[in-house]
Amino acid sequence: MTSLTPIEARYEELVRDNVSGSSDLAVKLCRFFEEFSTSDQQKLKTIAKSIYAYFTGMGLVRNTLLELLTALENDEDIAVKCQEIQLRMNSQSSTALEQISPLFSRRISVATISRSSQVSSALVKYSDRIREVYVLESRPMLEGFYFHLELLKKGLRSILLTDASMGEACRMADLCLVGCDSLLGDGTLIHKAGTLPLFSTMHYFSKCNYAIGLGMKEERNWTMDTYPEFREHPCNELGLEDGSCWNRYFEKVPYDLIDGVCTETGIRKYNTK
C-alpha cells in the first residue's frame, strides 16, 4: 500500500472529518492552505475544488474555499487571506449574537437539533431568560447528545429527547432555534437532517422557527431546486454493513417554514403568518 504524502494525508483528514462544525472546519482549511501555501499551486487549486464539492451543504466551508481559490489564482498571500477570513467570521458571529436578542425578551423554552456553536453562544449569553432547552439527539452521529452534555456543563437546564420525540419537544417549547449550515438565495435553509420535520411540527403547533448564522454562510447563487445533492455517508454509521440505507447529514427547509434568520445584519423575516 502506497503511503500518503503529507498534503494527501492532511486532505484525507479534512474530508473524513464528520464531527467538526463549519466554523471549526473553516479554521482547519485556513491552516491547511497556510501550511502548504508553497506547494504546487495547481495541486492546491484542485484540492480546493475537490473539498468544495465534498462539503455540499456547508456554506461557510464552501465560501471559505472559494475565497482561498481566488487568492491562489491571484497569487495573493494565503496567510493574510486566512487571517482576514477568520477575523470577519468572528466579527459576524459576535454581531449576530447581539442582533438575536429580541427573541429573548422574556423567559422562554427552546427546542433545537444538532450542535451549533452559534446556538450555544446565544443560549449561554441569554441564559437568564431561558427556562429549559429541549435537545434532539441528532442521529446518526449524536451531535445533539453531546450538545446536551455541553449545555449542562454550562449551567443550562437541558432535556435530551430522541429524534422521534420531536413532537413532545415542539409541544413544550416556545420557539425553535437552530444553526445555519447554508442559506440559499430563495431563503431555503440547509441544516441537519431532522430540521424539516422539526420546523413542520413547530409550525403545526403555531410556534416560531428561527435560525442563527453568518452572512459568510449564504450561497446566494443557489436555490432549493438547483442546489447539488448532499453526500451519502456510510451505512455502518446506522449499524448496517451493506448499502441498504440512506444516510445524508443535511436537508433543505423551505422559506415558508422559517420565521426569521438572524445574521450580523439583523433578523430577516420569511414566514409572515
Image: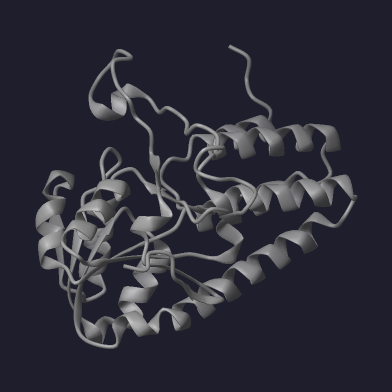
Residue 34 seen: no
Query: Which of the two residues, 102 or 58, is positioned nearer the viewer here?
Result: 102
Residue 96 seen: yes
- Residue at the location (65% across, 71% down)? 87
Tell me the quarter of the image containing the C terminus.
bottom left
- Residue at the location (38% across, 33% down)? 248
| Residue 36 position by quadrant | top right
Name the side, left or right, on which 251 lies relative to 77: left
| Residue 239 position by quadrant | top left
Residue 47: x, y in percent?
A: 70, 34
- Residue at the location (47% across, 52% down)? 188
Above or below — where is 170 with respect to 9? below
Name the side, left or right, on which 32 lies relative to 69: left
Above or below — where is 121 with respect to 159? below
Residue 169: x, y in percent?
A: 14, 59
- Residue at the location (28% across, 59% down)? 147
Residue 160: x, y in percent?
A: 15, 57
Name the side, left or right, on which 198 lies relative to 10: left
Total label count?
Answer: 0
| Residue 122 position by quadrant | bottom left
Tell me the quarter of the image containing the N terminus.
top right
Name the side, left or right, on which 31 lies relative to 151: right
Above or below — where is 43 with respect to 201? above
Query: Which of the two residues, 16 or 164, is positioned nearer the viewer here?
Result: 164
